[in-house]
Image (cartoon, rainbow, N blue to C red):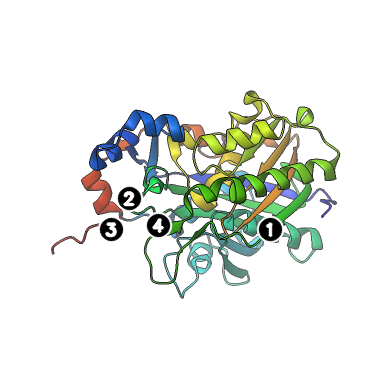
Amino acid sequence: MKGGHMAGIVGYGAYLPKFRIKVEEIARQWGADPEAIKRGLLLEEKTVPAPDEDTITISVEAGRNALRRAGIEPSKIGAVYVGSESHPYAVKPTGTVVAEALAITPEVHIADYEFACKGGTEAMFVAYCEVVAGALEYALAIGADTSQGAPGDALEYSASAGGSAFIFGKEHVLAEVLETYSYTTDTPDFWRREGEFYPQHGGRFTGEPAYFKHVYNAGKAILEKTGLTPREITYAVFHMPNGKFPLTVGKRLGFKTEQLEVGWIVPLMGNTYSGSSPTGLCAILDVAKPNDLILMVSFGSGAGSDAFVYRLTDRLPEVQDRAPKVREMLEGKRYYVNYGTYAKFRNKIKLVE
């Protein structure tokens, strides 16, 4: 789909919880070798949601930061879409609470999206398309999660919390969408049945047939569609289930480390599922310059990838400092928790009243 009429991102913002747990702390609980895990996953620590934090509160904070950078009245936003696989309610929208908190209601279209880890880019795609079509002046898309990993499972080292929000429009655009592309198949690599708290996954099957196949093909196809080579792209960001996968697929596509490292925030954050590649995009937008080109490719199990190519405009430097930056939230004041506190926060043990 062509991104004519300068449609693109007019405001962006992220939010990450301040509580963290280190790989060593989780490994100690299960008698595992922390150094081997850190080498294997390229992870150091991950975000942990506080007891009063969930996908709704994360979405609201990210949305507020996006509004600060957009500099528009919330009432001008005609749609709010929240992509997540940890919506607080099975039946009751996340988006209505978020829109109410951001003073966007009542003249607004709202929907919750879910596609494993690509719910966020799913929301971004639809918001962008509505703006391009002229149906809406502005649309807000959010990718946020408080990811689940069963105790002792490999996912426990990576599943984290956080999210990012993007306001799409045609006026005051800071990142023009040049092209989009989606690549999807029925690949059952990761799933969670209704009523089950923790997801299950197909182990190594989640790598080559799922993540690498979809991310690589989406990345390759959108480069062909735009006629761009990896050399011409300033920064590339991919879904980050761990530290190794995005670096590996980036190199396969022809990117160099310096093009990948700015958006590669997973070692200090973990995998925020629907918020993973969107938050990597925010980290790039925090430091990028006008005319830079960004490739972003998400991934959601089940399985599919959405790809976007953005060209940054002269407006970006004006808004970068209007809200907290991703690296500031990553490397600023953190509160480390032990495994018992982590388990309590994540409702893994039932507390005696």
Q: Could you give the CA–CA distance between mark 1 and mark 4, rounded to whole angstroms? A: 29 Å
Amino acid identity at mark 4: Asp
Q: Residue at x 60, y 34 (%)?
A: 248
**Residue type at mark 3?**
Asn
Q: Residues within 10 Å of mark 3 (few under 14, many from 20)?
A: few
Q: Which mark is residue 184?
A: 1
Neighbour tally class for label 1: few under 14, some 14-19, many 20 plus, Cα within 10 Å: some
Name the mark nearer the viewer: 1 or 4. 1
Disc 2: CA contacts within 10 A as few (<14), some (14-19) or many (>=20)? some
Rendered location of residue 13, percent (x, y): 56, 45
In the rendered structure, are the residues bearing label 1 and label 4 in contact, judged by CB atoms less than 8 Å apart? no
The secondary element bearing badge 3 is classed as: loop
- The numbered mark, 1 or 4, whose residue comes first in the sequence reads 4
Check disc 4 and report its element: helix, strand or loop.
Answer: loop
Q: Which mark is residue 50?
A: 2
- Amino acid identity at mark 2: Ala
Closer to the eye: label 3 or 1: 1
Which image quarter: residue 56? bottom left
Q: Quadrant of the N terminus?
A: bottom right
CB of mark 1 within 8 Å of CB of mark 2?
Answer: no
Q: Residue 349 appears at what percent x and percent y?
A: 22, 58
Q: CA separation, marks 3 and 4?
A: 12 Å
Q: Earlier in the sequence, mark 2 or mark 3?
A: 2
Please name the residue shown 24% across and 38% down the image: 31
| Circle 4 residue | 54
| Residue for badge 3 | 347
Disc 2/disc 3 C-alpha distance (Å): 11 Å
Choose between 289 and 275: the one closer to the eye. Answer: 275
Distance Cα–Cα, label 3 vs label 1: 34 Å
